[in-house]
Amino acid sequence: MSAKTTQQPIIVCKDVHKWFGDFHALRGVSMEVQRGEVIVIFGPSGSGKSTFIRTINRLEEHQRGDITVDGIELSHDVRNIEKIREETGMVFQQFNLFPHLTVLQNITLAPMWVRKWSKQRAEEKAMELLKRVGIPEQAGKYPGQLSGGQQQRVAIARALAMEPKIMLFDEPTSALDPEMIKEVLDVMIELAKTGMTMLVVTHEMGFARSVADRMFFFDKGEIVESGTPEAIFKKPKEDRTKLFLSQILHH
């Protein structure tokens, strides 16, 4: 295979628009993400960044433009949507764990239902992932017995249990107490090093600086600026980027 054929981007968004009633939430967003790239999306609240990553697995439906994930176009075809959701793990601000299921059951549910794995295989995978996120001893507990940081690490393990090709993170640390943020970011940094394709909406600029390949600054539903962390932190071109960075880096 030539280099060109292997360099097919895993996510292609072209001129994506989204309205909520009269509110134009995404105004022509275009982005290509290569396999194994770690992308950080940042910007003020209401800038469309969460809406944008939620369009990638069709949690939000875009009204104009094209989105293709791993060669599958996101259309109204439900089979395409299901296929894309199987390939994209998602981690939210709120952990969304099932409170009545143990940690282990939370992680094994989807692989057994969707991937049709045996209970044994699913549990082995779940324990391996709990070790990876540093909490194998919590397997038999219920989410309510865990700290927020532990719950979020379970949520990451749960998403990874489906063996996705892409991981989407929507402000994964913003609901956590400060002392728990690092334990979650550390898991994400480890994951980034394995070559997982990741799109992360976050204000954690230390994380962006250490693992992002590229950063995208969103404001008012548009990509205002993008570049490597080095370029974004040292030489931002746009005034809006400079202003936003000065606000979040110096508070």
Image (cartoon, rainbow, N blue to C red):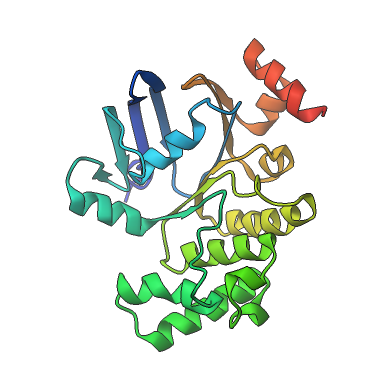
> Relative to 216, is 235 on the left or the right?
right
Residue 104: percent from left, percent from top:
52, 78
Q: Residue visible at 63% across and 76% down? A: 131
The residue located at (34%, 59%) in the rendering is 86
Q: Establish if 188 lies above or below 220.
A: below
The front one of 133 and 104 is 104
Taking the image as shown, residue 201 lies to the left or right of residue 57, namely right
Residue that sits furthest to the right in the current view: 250
- Say which of 235 and 49 sits in front: 49
User: Would residue 248 be seen by someone viewing this image from the given angle?
Assistant: yes
Number of marks: 0
Image quarter where the C terminus lies is: top right
User: x and y percent of residue 146 in the render?
Assistant: 67, 69
Quadrant of residue 202 within the rendered picture = top right
Residue pictured at 66% horizontal, 11% vertical: 239
Q: Residue at x 59, y 80 (%)?
A: 139
- Residue 9: in sight, yes or no? no
x, y (%) of residue 114?
A: 30, 69
Query: Residue reaching furthest bottom?
Result: 120
Residue lying furthest top in this view? 239
Q: Position of residue 222 (x, y in %)?
A: 47, 20
Farthest residue, direction left = 77
Taking the image as shown, residue 204 lies to the left or right of residue 171, namely right
